[in-house]
Amino acid sequence: MLLASALLASAQTGPRFDVASIKPASDDEIAGGASGITTGHGRAVGTNVTLKRCIIGSYHVGPGQVTGGPTWIDSDRFHIEAKTAGPVNDDAIFDAMLRNLLAERFHLALHRETRKLRALVLVVSKRGPKLERAEGGDAVTEARHGALTLKNSTMGALAERLARATDLPVVNRTGLTGIFNLTLTWTPDNDQPKPDGPPPLSSALNEQLGLQLKAERAPIEVLVIDHVEKPTEN
């Protein structure tokens, strides 16, 4: 409780949304299956999302980097709407607002640890990268089942997204700096392959982007949940 109280106090003094609402997802939202978080112009909308998904998004980690807490953080679904009076152009401040919202409404308290875990390392393939350098602008992410488009994004952002697709931490060791535009399509492991469909993720990365994923154990930062409660509404 002391950890939760300390983090809640921090949230109340840090950057916050001006208006925020958190409600259990309706039966229609859950039945519809649509789920995700959209952000932009000082607004965040989470539809049919779990708390774990919110943690992953606001702390920029993969699913395998969140541990601890009750089982409902990965099963109960919520509808979240939060906005500021004006646009927020600093991504770090916006992420802090999201984290503070979780601390205030879910009384979420956590700490970071470094553990040696099974992971995937993102490297450049022997034939070299096939990447388009970006000219600059707002970072844009469009993620769908078996499809990913990144604009004005770093290799670190790509590694973060790949971690969500593989359920394993992904470490960026490409050595590539700067920002890129890229599109990647693949057939997820649990899908039935089609003769004319895209290849599995590892082959798609190599063929489409000139990158590879290699399995190894590596020191990975994880988020350990110390305290969490069902959310208070509005």
Image (cartoon, rainbow, N blue to C red):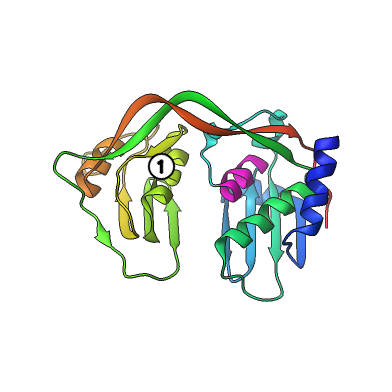
Q: What element does badge 1 sit on?
A: helix
* Left or right of residue 12, residue 190 in this image: left
Q: Residues within 10 Å of mark 1 (few under 14, many from 20)?
A: many
Decide if residue 165 is in sight here: yes
Vertical comparison of 81 with 1: above or below: below
| Residue 51 place in picture, x, y as percent | 67, 43
**Residue 206: where, in percent of width, then height?**
22, 41
Q: Pinpoint residue 153: horizontal percent, then vertical percent.
A: 39, 58
Q: Is residue 58 magenta?
A: yes
Q: Which residue is mark 1?
A: 162
Q: Is residue 8 magenta?
A: no
Using the image as rendered, state which of residue 212 and residue 38 is in the foreground.
212
> Looking at the image, which is closer to me, 176 or 39?
176
Position of residue 12 in the picture relative to residue 222 (left or right): right
Reply above or below: 62 against 119.
below
**Residue 120 is drawn in which quadrant?**
top left
Q: Say what amino acid the circle numbered 1 marks.
A: Leu
Q: Main secondary structure of the magenta part?
A: helix
Question: What is the magenta range?
Answer: 51-59
Residue 87: % across, % down: 62, 74
